[in-house]
Image: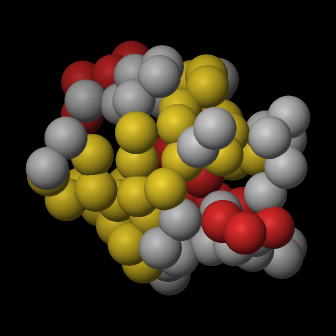
Amino acid sequence: MSHTHAADLQIDSAMTLNQVGVGCDVRISQLSGPGCDRLRDLGFCEQLLVRKLSAGRNLICSLCGTRLAISRELAEQVVVSPMA
């Protein structure tokens, strides 16, 4: 799976948080999957701005001034779009 950098994103494109390159700022479009309730409990919600800080076994994201680590499985359920 290739990672996309902010300069490569199309305005009408949507992808999961797993697919976004490290350092990219994106907006959450949709939470889709069985982990939605858990993601909402962590503070993820539609229209929220997120920056992906690192990728590995877990992803580290910055949202609302807080750094959170989530599993790749949860990150796959976060559909994001580039900042317009």
- Residue at the farthest left position: 65
What is the x, y in percent for residue 34? 57, 24
Q: Nearer the viewer, residue 18 or 73?
A: 18
Quarter of the image containing the N terminus?
bottom right
Visible residue check, residue 80: no
Residue 5, how many percent across, how many down?
Answer: 69, 72
Q: Residue at x 61, y 22 (%)?
A: 30
Residue plotted at (24% across, 34% down):
42
Count of all numbered marks drawn on residues in the image: 0
Quarter holding the C terminus is top right
Q: Is residue 61 above or below residue 74?
A: below
Q: Is residue 7 left or right of residue 63?
A: right
Q: Position of residue 78 (x, y in %)?
A: 58, 37
Q: Is residue 21 left or right of residue 46?
A: right
Residue at point 14%, 50% (across, down): 65
Q: Nearer the viewer, residue 8 or 19?
A: 8
Residue 33 higher or lower than 49, as above or below:
above
User: Measuring 83% from the left and 76% from the top, which residue is drawn there?
Assistant: 2
Left or right placement of residue 18 versus residue 65 in this view: right
Q: Nearer the viewer, residue 27 or 55?
A: 27
| Image quadrant in which you'd find residue 13 | top right
Q: Position of residue 74 (x, y in %)?
A: 51, 45
Residue 50 appearing in the image: yes
* Horizontal arrangement in the rendering, residue 60 relative to residue 42 (left or right): right
